[in-house]
Image (spheres, rainbow, N blue to C red):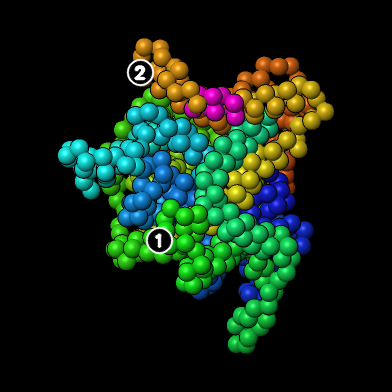
Amino acid sequence: MHLTTEEKIELGLHPVFGDSDDQPQLTDIAEPHNNESLGQTMDQEIDLVYSLNDRPAWYLCILLGFQHYVLAFGGIIAVPLILAEPLCIADNNEAKSQLISTIFFVSGLCTLLQTTIGIRLPILQGATFNFMTPTLAILALPKWQCPVPDAHAMQLKNGSTPLTGEKLDEIWMSRICEIQGAILVASLFQIFLGFSGLVGFVLKYIGPLTIAPTINLIGLSLFIEAGKKCGSHWGIAALTVGLILLFSQYLSKVNVPMFAYKDRKWKVFQYPLFKLFSALFGMCGAWLVCFLLTAFDVLPLNSTEYGFSARTDINLNAVTNSPWFHMPYPGQWGMPTVSLSSVLGMMAGVLASTMESIGDYYACARLSGAPPPPTHAINRGIGVEGIGCVLAAIWGTGNGTTSFSQNIAALGITKVGSRLVLQTTAVLMIFLGVFGKFGAVFITIPDPVIGGMFLVMFGMIAAVGISNLQYVDLNSSRNLLILGFSTFSGLVLPTWFHSNPGIIDTGVTELDQVIIVLLTTHMFIGGFLGFLLDNTIPGTEKERGINSWQEKVKEGGNVSSDLSCYDIPFSNRFLKRFKCFQYLPFLPTYKTSKERLST
């Protein structure tokens, strides 16, 4: 999302950050490193402990890398947990465990790729909710409906062949292959946008009135999923929300004294423990309460009674039965299948992800002590994100990858903007993704605890979308009409089509599926109507908020003229030998037509 640095910290997608005005100083951990290539002005402005090209000690890389991993895990793990039911694996713990391991593994690969040859900023790549609404719309098609829960018992009564383990696997694998194919083809469009340099052209026509309803509807459209989880025990869900709010808001300015060994002696420093790990503490606190209630048999033992889902011993067999090591590999669920309706629906997620990432790049550059990213770096970053989504589709995560806003905000709090730290995080994610029992542990989290996390998380996503409206004139009836109509239509149309299945009948099955997927994807309807009306109804640039929005994204100015931190490693000499490379918009040697004429 296109937010300033202060807004990134206050409105990150994960509710773990408080205001950025009172940021703790962690200079007791290590001495600041000099890095002339990134400009001393920026380092002094944000008082970095480590800037972009600095290399902290190996043990600090591991500790700080693990911190980024913890910050991201809540958002990453939410995706497979939401997809479990529509993929028909709600009761298949082995499949859920493998899906969790795969998504962490691929997130690590994509982070390593982005920080090495992509935008080359300390930016973490992970699962994105931008792909969630089109995914749910695809899986809601009649042909992907899960078998009736009692179908297995009915088959036994009728004497027909019951569903074997292989057939059950075939049911969910065919569904995830459909999602894989949609993400794979749609991501090719993102690759084209990035490496062709068309990103800048597209953004000229996309403003806050397009982004606000698009991102807002991502959060609003997921309220049913949050309600299902919370409804299994509202008390535990409320406890989870209360703990997250306690740590992230009420205790956000409380720093915890901690010890560090430096200069051959122990030192005490203040650390914003609650602010950084509020989601983790909130989830673990509620998880512990559920464990104690289970141990003392306070929660019901009968699966039909209210509150049974809050028990922690329901899925313990997932941990014991899962292998110690599981190596995710390409095509592990089968070959991706492609259908036009699924691809077109997924395009909305690709565009939303692209818009979100561009804003993240500028915020990350400012917080890591780097100059604002040049055009070639942004183009390459978007292209590499597309490649990351292709990898996610090939491995079969059921989702794509995008930049994580909450980890960018953490850079401003920890004052550590080193690229090497995020590369260490990537290695940790790959390692833990191979560790099979690690993924299985998360399956034991009770449903109401997950529901409480969803309530806060999805609410924050909706709020971040609304925050983009600060740049537009909200006293303008034009803007209010566009915003209200696009948002309301994004809620009404999908709900109506879901409640009236079979209403679309053109006589061509494929065309029916395209129309249904597009008209049941909330963010597509809201974003498309916002884009169409904002670009056709007359209005000034100031009224639409286009200029102020783009200026805020790039706020901070060009404090350093040295852009070498965005160069591709070990390639500069080769690229400078041939003039043809200056025409490729994703290479450091790229020059615009004006720059070529001036030289």
392 drawn magenta? no
Which mark, by number, is residue 509? 2
Q: Nearer the viewer, residue 447 or 341?
A: 447
Apparent side of residue 373 relative to residue 437 in the rendered image (left or right):
right
By secondary structure, the bulk of the magenta-drawn segment is best described as helix
Name the amino acid, label 2.
Thr
Residue stretch in magenta: 490-498
Residue at the spot 68% in from the left edge and 74% down from the top edge? 256
Q: Secondary structure at mark 1?
A: loop
Q: Earlier in the sequence, mark 1 or mark 2?
A: 1
**Circle 1 Cα neighbour tier, 10 Å, few/some/many (<14 / 14–19 / ≥20):** some
On the image, the x and y values in percent for residue 454 come to: 56, 50
On the image, the x and y values in percent for residue 364 come to: 62, 51
* Quadrant in which the C terminus appears: top right
Compared to 504, does 274 lie above or below?
A: below
495 drawn magenta? yes
**Discs 1, 2 touching: Cβ within 8 Å:** no
Q: Secondary structure at mark 2?
A: helix
Q: Which residue is mark 1?
A: 314
On the image, the x and y values in percent for residue 237 come to: 58, 56
Name the amino acid, label 1.
Ile
